[in-house]
Image (cartoon, rainbow, N blue to C red):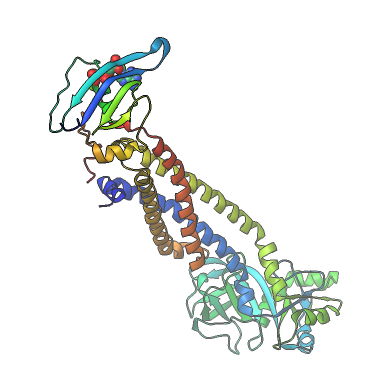
Amino acid sequence: MAVPIVQVERLSKTFGAGETAVRALAEVDLVVEAGEVVGLKGPSGSGKSTLLNLIACIQEPTGGRLSIGGETVWDGQWRVADLRALRRERIGFIFQFPTPSTMSHWP
Amino acid sequence: MNLALADIRHKLGRFVLTCLGLGLLMAVALSMVGIYQGVVSEALALSRSLRADLWVVESGTRGPFAEASRIPGDVREMVARLPGVAAAGAITLRTAEAQAPQGTIRVQVIGYEPGRPGGPSAISTGRGLGGTRFEIVADARSGLPLGATLLLGRHRYQVVGTTRGLVSSGGDPLIFMHLRDSQDLQFRLAPAAARRALAAATGGGGTDTVNAIIARLHPGADPALVAEIAQRWKHLAALTDRQQSDLLTMSVVNRARVQLGMFTVVLLFVSAVIIALIIYTMTMDKLREIATLKLIGAPDRTIIGLVLQQALLLGGMAYVAAVAIVFSARDVFPRAVVLGPGEVTAMAGVIAVICLLGSLVSIRAALRIEPQQALGG
Ligand SMILES: Nc1ncnc2c1ncn2[C@@H]1O[C@H](COP(=O)(O)OP(=O)(O)O)[C@@H](O)[C@H]1O
Ligand SMILES: [Mg+2]
């Protein structure tokens, strides 16, 4: 069996600390195989954007483990030296709110 | 297509306007440099044109430009006989208001003897002074055409030739006339005043007075040595051409020069701040684009390149506009705006440095932008 494209294990994300801490994600598991199309649904504020940001390596998780293409990317700390190169080479983005200024005029 | 160019094309109108505005500012700074140079070069225009090696003036003075100097006209023969002197000429110098066809003009009148040192080194139209009196050679800056007449004192003078670029240290056009004519104009008192002077016996009766004797030396003669010999006459002082030039720039036009120099520095500083601010605003306008570039994994050098290329392009276009503006407008200025290849190149260097420094702040800010800022939700 091929390695999953995205593997998320007990991934957590807490914004802030102390009294004002917001636990956006609590120990989420998710596996996406190559060629699969996965939709994520839930009420506003349920953590959809946060999960996608973590998978895209735009934000840093606070717990759990994230692998992309079989390679561990985060498990308590970043395991990839150049995150931008990872995004450039292995991740594609389709924006939620494309604005005229967002790259539309750039080739 | 290059990222910097693509982004500029997207907001072309705004970029062109910014370039033009910045070009105007740089044009002002460049003109100031030219005006500064103009003051210095005009101060030296006359002494350069006279090609004097030695200036003999009244003892105790550093004339005739920095201080008033009066010596008897026959000193010229004494100077001409000094060892090392090839030719000597007597000159008078005086600023005057004259009636020209177009109105009252301010001129500096130089009297000299044609055939001896003291005349214009080059005539641009017409001819030099001939044998007849009441002729003048006028600089083009006076606006007098060939054949025009100029009313100076009680006499009319006819323009027989014109020169180009010969002005006094104050920027007034030079008018050359016969020594005799200028002495009449300068030293002969109006009849009523002459009678009083005679009665009070204050002198001033003799009209063979001049302001300075200029001497050209034989090649190989040492100006300092000849000056020393001339000084032995108690009523005379002598300056080498080098000393005269230094006096003109360091003393006669010193205040104007320093004033303009300081203003030029202030202007360059203000321009630097404005350029830095424009580049910073240009970068901050692209906050979202830069965040997106980072999001999709563009390396830092892409972002640095984007800011730097746009800054240099802006500076370059504005500089070209500035040079075009200054060179098409400089003849409109009432005084010389002197810009050689040296100054124009130096200005390009200064602007490049300002653009680079201005970019540094923007690049720092751009590199601190977080990729999340690209996402709206
Ligand atoms: N940068 C942040 N700082 C603090 N709290 C945040 C931040 N981003 C998201 N949150 C919180 O995390 C929770 C999940 O948000 P989000 O992932 O945007 O939900 P969704 O996309 O499903 O609407 C929300 O309670 C939100 O307020
Ligand atoms: Mg969301």
Image quadrant for the N terminus of chain A?
top left
Q: Which is more toward the observer, A91 or A68?
A: A68
The reply to whether residue A37 is in sight is yes
**Is residue B248 shown above or below B293?**
below
Q: x and y percent of residue B89 in the render? A: 70, 84
Q: x and y percent of residue B367 in the render? A: 40, 38
Q: Which is more toward the observer, B47 or A31?
A: A31
Residue at (43%, 60%) from the top-left corner? B326
**Relative side of B249 to B234, left or right:** left
**Relative side of B9 to B220, left or right:** left
- Quarter holding ligand 1: top left
Residue B174 position by quadrant: bottom right
The reply to whether residue B190 is in sight is no
Residue at (25%, 15%) from the top-left corner? A45
**Relative side of B111 to B231, left or right:** left
Q: x and y percent of residue B39 in the render? A: 58, 63
**Is residue B85 shown above or below B183?**
below
**Is residue B10 shown above or below B72?**
above
Residue at (35%, 21%) from the top-left corner? A62
Q: Which is more toward the observer, B207 or A8?
A: A8
